[in-house]
Amino acid sequence: DFPTGAIIMGSAGIKQSYETGRGSITVRAKAHVESTKTGRSRLVFTEIPYMVNKGTLQEKIAQLVNDKRIEGISDMRDESNQKGIRLVIELKKGVIPQVVLNNLYKYTSLQTTFGANNLALVNGVPKCLSLREMLQHYIDHQVDVVTRRTRFDLKKAQARAHILEGYLMALDHIDEVISIIRSSQTDSEASSRLIERFGFTPEQTTAILEMKLRRLTGLERDKIQEELDGLRRAIAYYEDLLAHEEKILGVIKEEMREISKKFGDKRRTEISQVEKDLDVEDLIADEDMVVTITHTGYVKRIPVAAYRAQKRGGKGVSGVNLKEDDVIDEMFIASTHEYVLFFSSKGKVYRLKVHELPVGTRQARGTAIVNLLPFEEGEKIASVISCREFPADEYLMFATKSGMVKKTVMSAYDRSRRDGLIAINLRDDDALLNVRRVRDGDKIILATTAGKAIMFSEEQVRATGRDTSGVRGIGLKDGVSVLGMEVTNGNGDLFVITERGYGKRTPVADYPEQNRGGQGVYTIQMTERKGNLAAMKTVGPQHELFIVTEGATVIRVKTDEISQTGRATQGVKMMTVDDNDRICAVARMTAAKERPEGEATENGSAPEETPVDLGDGNDMPEDLLDE
């Protein structure tokens, strides 16, 4: 029970500390939600965890709001007074209070862990005690205290009774006592004569010689007799108490009850049986978001309805307002409940949920990733993938700029650390380029800026641990680098596009399966006016493509509107690209099937075509079409 109140989350930590002497007890502030006249909500904290400084707590909350780690807070004020604590946090309109509250508990000392360590000296030796041992040692100590105290009181009572017995005997022979005292020349002579005559002890004779004359009255004699009778009863009680240990324990119980009655008060800290936090995802709709990440590290998520479909060859719409030196690197679709794994250029991986990413508009640049993840200087996002789970029978395939590939089981990444995990070991002159999910039997396709591609089985890449470098995936000549990697089960087409907007799709089956480490084959006829190969994706008839330029122009094209040609052909113009612009990325999604007028299935929905399974776990699964 803490003096500052608050709430203990669950009794497991208490039980552990009572049983073993050590335990971790989670304590969180007590809060309630109030509604304002304007329809907004406010969080009011009336009790905070033990040893938490309120001023430091407010500074931390303000810092998190400024860094946009916690969204939805508009104001904060301290209304504490002599009656108690009242810390008020005003929320923005439409914000779910429980979501903000859980984030405050997660990132601030409004929820802390109190470490119980019952260390005590037992016979001069430090020892960690359980609750039973603590109580037993305390009881043993109290037994010793009461025993020694009783012995002291008994000895004191016996000494006083002895003196009073001497008084009464002297009063019974007062005339003879006075005569002996008057006829003695010194105190010692009087004392020795009294001892010889009446058998007094030296203590009794000393008391008699010092006795005042007023004690000779009859009333004083009655008082002495009454005091002696009381002492004799006390002596009998003390002797009986020392002879029976159970009576000593009874004294301890009674004294503890008196302490409880005098100093005890009501419990201040509430013990909640809810041991885990309310899942924030229970309060967040499971909906698809378009996640956009730029080259300089700006990230945002926006609803899928912000984009609309266009025909092939269109000019597109503005996808994001960027700085002059920025380009879009990644664009994909993921549910708000999925994880996003951020793989950095230095081979590290960081993990966030989609709903933890900042929400933006189609034109907004987004939030700098350094405000969300602890990137080192010079570290940038190389690739991202989204997933709900981390199965032990699936793998992640890595590709680097220098043509290295590595395969590692997904379950190895089912944990996160604030400063990131090592995802792949890189050489000083290399950089991580792509990460994709693979399953048994999948094929790996690597493409280079020179327009060559190689396809080999994932079985040729032996699975290794997280902190490894991998093996050679494709041979490169001077000045050529890998631009991307795709994973397929052999179905569908490979779509490629050059920097100047020339693209085509070719059946994956047209590409020969080779051994890992070869030079590859041409995937498109390369000419100077087309520029280098810019991007590649495996696609099926159910897909649509986002084609993105460095100038942040986005166009959407259905797969069946793209010419399907042979492997080493010219391709067609997919997009009109300005002279000072170039294509930098392609993102894929699953398109909705248009329903013929008047045609519907039994449940009212349009019949769908059977999609081509490409074996790629990184597909964008939902429709983005506007009405």
Image (cartoon, rainbow, N blue to C red):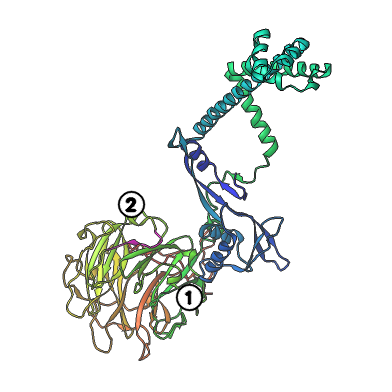
Relative to the observer, which residue lies in front, 341 or 105?
105
Q: How many labels does the image show?
A: 2
Residue, far bottom: 579
In the image shown, does 466 or 259 lie closer to the viewer? 259
User: Left of 30 or right of it: where is 469?
Assistant: left
**Magenta region includes residue 490:** no
Residue at 67% x, 20% y: name it: 187
Q: Is mark 2 on a helix, strand or loop?
A: loop
Q: What stretch is highlighted in magenta?
A: 417-424
- Three-letter amino acid code at the position of disc 2: Ala
Question: Does residue 602 appear in the picture of this structure?
Answer: yes
| Quadrant occupied by the N terminus | top right
Question: Alpha carbon of mark 1 to alpha carbon of mark 2: how far?
Answer: 34 Å
Check disc 2: other Cα within 10 Å, few if <14, some if 14-19, many if 20+.
Answer: few
Most extreme residue toward the top, as rendered? Answer: 197
Q: Do the residues labelled 1 and 2 touch (CB within 8 Å)?
A: no
Instruction: Write down the residue under mark 2.
Output: 392
- x%, y% of residue 241? 62, 18
Residue 181 x %, y %: 72, 15
Q: Residue at x 34, y 68 (%)?
A: 344
Residue identifier under label 1 = 366
